[in-house]
Amino acid sequence: MSNAHISALTKRLCGHLDMYSFSSKGRDGRRSDSLYAATTLCGDCRARVGRSLERPGTGFFPVALPALAGRSNAVSWAKDIRLKALRKMGPVMAQLKRSDDPLATAALAVYEMLFKIPLALFWIENREFPFDSSWVVSEVEHLMRRRPSSVVRLNGCSAFYYWSQADAGVIATAKEASSAIIDVDVVPAVQPDVPPAPKTLPVITQCIFL
């Protein structure tokens, strides 16, 4: 069986076309590659998410943190972990809130799902996890899919996975907030801030009669 890398224009989860490399072995491998491409964002959309998280500055985003559940010593430890995470991600969330990019809106919904998690053990087990751009992209993709994909694994650091087990209503709220990129043919591009064209006075042509 051939294991040659084949690159082809492929429609991605966001509706955009980009070049995707098909490299798995055999017919089943190619089918798996095709399914993965169709259920993940294109390179440009991934980059857009990454840019929306860069250089957040010192902004603040108000978050209503739920009471943590677990043993008393675990709750105390998890509070410190969660507070540290919020101090790091609060400015990022504030920046996402100011953005007009629908992917940034979805990224904010992802972080809001994260900070709604009340289980102390979740925060303790993921205390070293960065919840960075790659994680945000993966979580946004989870929100965008109409159904779970067999080629994408859910893991313990996923807020989407947590709420899929605990309360699907939280996911529904995040999907509603992300409606601009869900159930659309193509994820809309960012609308640039274009200054309005200056008003021009009508040109008066002088008529001379001979």
Image (cartoon, rainbow, N blue to C red):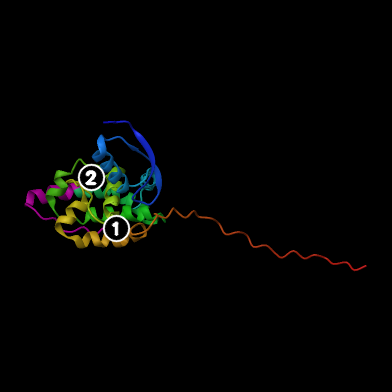
Q: Amino acid at mark 2?
A: Val
Q: Is residue 76 magenta?
A: yes
Relative height, residue 128 to residue 112 (above, below): above
Residue 33 in the image: state x and y as whole percent.
28, 41
In the drawing, does residue 187 fall left or right of residue 135?
Answer: right
Judged by depth in the image, the label closer to the viewer, 1 or 2, is 2
Quadrant of the image for the N terminus? top left
Quadrant hosting residue 65: bottom left
Q: Amino acid at mark 1?
A: Pro
Q: Residue furthest left?
A: 71
Secondary element at image label 1: loop
Q: Is residue 44 visible?
A: no
Identify the residue at horizontal 40%, vertical 49% (top origin).
16
Q: Is residue 123 magenta?
A: no
Badge 2 crowding class, 10 Å Cα cut-off, few under 14, some 14 to 19, many 20 or more, is: few
The residue lying toward the viewer, choosing from 144 and 169, is 144
Residue linked to disc 2: 151
Q: Which portion, as a residue range, is magenta?
A: 61-81
Relative height, residue 33 to residue 162 (above, below): above
Residue 152 in the image: state x and y as whole percent.
23, 45
Quadrant of the image for the C terminus? bottom right
Quadrant hosting residue 47: top left
Secondary element at image label 2: loop
Residue linked to disc 1: 62
